[in-house]
Image: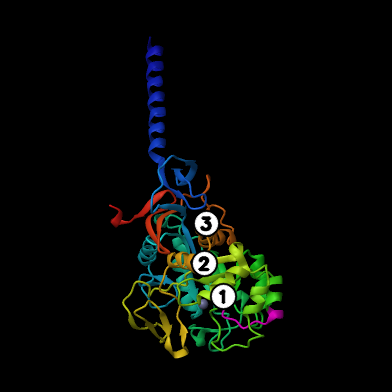
Amino acid sequence: MKYRTAFYQFSCFLLTTIFLIGTMESKAQQVVEGIHYHTGLPVQVKISNGIIQDIVVIDKAAEENPVYIAPGFFDNQVNGFAGVSFAFGDSDLTPEGIEKATRELWKKGVTSYLPTLTTNSIEVLTSNFELLSKAVDNKSLLGSIPGFHLEGPYINPEDGFRGAHPKQFVKLPDWDEFMKLHVASGRNILQVTLAPEMEGAMDFITKASREGIVVALGHHNGDMKTVTTAIDKGAKIATHLGNGAANMINRHYNPFWPQLADDRLHISIIGDSFHLLPEEIQVFYKVKGVEKTIITSDVTHYAALEPGEYKTSTGETIELTEGGMLRYPAQNVLYGSASPITKGVGYVIKVTGCTLADAVQMASTNPARLYNLTDRGVLEPGKRADLVLFTLDDFQVNVHETWVKGERVYESKSEK
Ligand SMILES: [Zn+2]
């Protein structure tokens, strides 16, 4: 009798446990509906434990202005956002600031991004990398920061090619110094942008490529031979092609032709409508195609601030115009962008006539693939549930919802 009671109690316990696990599982599963950005069919995306479990085509009447569902945008060049700079020394770069910038980027449909540190003193770069390294594992950021982009200080110091990078901190490539920065970042530098014509650059490119770090060519004046050798040694992408160059260049001998001519090289383009003319984007896209083009923002912390003049921590005067253009008047060059990647997605569709599927590939899939981040960048079972839901209104992407690792982190108020 005693045995029977114990058995009965054990069975009850077992059934309750199974029931509870079942409840937890069903609670953990979420369903998001939208028009699949690639197939154009209405779908349900089933999510469990932060991962896409299944994508099912459903019966749904066609809407006039459908809400698309796509893999969240991946921006590989974010210098700062909403008043928080990743690149400056005396800014309010704190763990809270990084969380604030990330939350604001989520509102724009960005689910992954590389905080980008530009030319500065090694001390500032080191301390900023040390601080940012903790963000990679910060659970509240849900894996939105997979690593970093270092743009400089190993770039061409000449006016124009240097862009708005402060000259006093521009220097020749130094592998040992770079490795110290890489260690300070928790070995999380995923991309380094440099000028291949600088002394020591080729050796640097070989070593970085061996480490699995993506080498980008940028702020440079490399000729055909230099660019080709850099690609032979492992360089994979041209950073913001068409920018980071002098206003007056030779019509034959300039860094653009060899970078466009070599099919091995990816390019990133800034689609804020200020950095490149429509015909430049059209030609770059025709040459490189959807597989080798990446839409980026180069957005700075001036994004979302009032128009006017600002002083940088390194003493430069920057102007944010009424139209959203960010200028560095002393050199008559642009000073990064004030528009998130989201604007670029709509603008590239507008000027190239590419499909929405192609634009999403250039803003989500290609960057994830370039950094070998196989857990994201596509809408497929088994991948992270990083989703953006949006309407496309007159070539403008209006974000309705953003999901990161299966959590809805943003929902447009106007929808309610
Ligand atoms: Zn740049």
Q: Which residue is mark 2?
A: 295
Task: Identify whether 8 is placed above or below 37.
Answer: above
Determine which quarter of the picture holds residue 33: top left
Whichever of labels 1 and 2 marks the residue nearer the N terminus, that label is 1
Whichever of labels 3 and 1 marks the residue nearer the N terminus, that label is 1
Amino acid at dot 3: Ala
Question: What secondary structure is marked by label 1?
Answer: loop
Foreground: 290 or 179? Answer: 290
Residue 382 in the image: x percent, y percent? 53, 45
Is label 3 in contact with label 1 (beta carbons under 8 Å)? Answer: no
Label 3 vs label 2, nearer the camera: 3
Q: Which residue is mark 3?
A: 357
Task: Identify whether 135 is placed above or below 5.
Answer: below
Q: Which residues are magenta?
A: 219-226
- The crowd level at tag 2 (other Cα within 10 Å; few <14, some 14-19, many 20+) is many
Q: Whole-Å distance between the Cαs marked 3 and 2?
A: 13 Å
Residue 129 in the image: x percent, y percent? 48, 69
Label 3 vs label 1, nearer the camera: 3
Q: Is 221 a magenta residue? A: yes
Question: What secondary structure is marked by label 3?
Answer: helix
* Numbered label attached to residue 162: none
Q: Which residue is mark 1?
A: 241
Residue 52 in the image: x percent, y percent? 48, 45
Task: Identify whether 368 is placed above or below 94.
Answer: above
Q: Quadrant of the N terminus?
A: top left
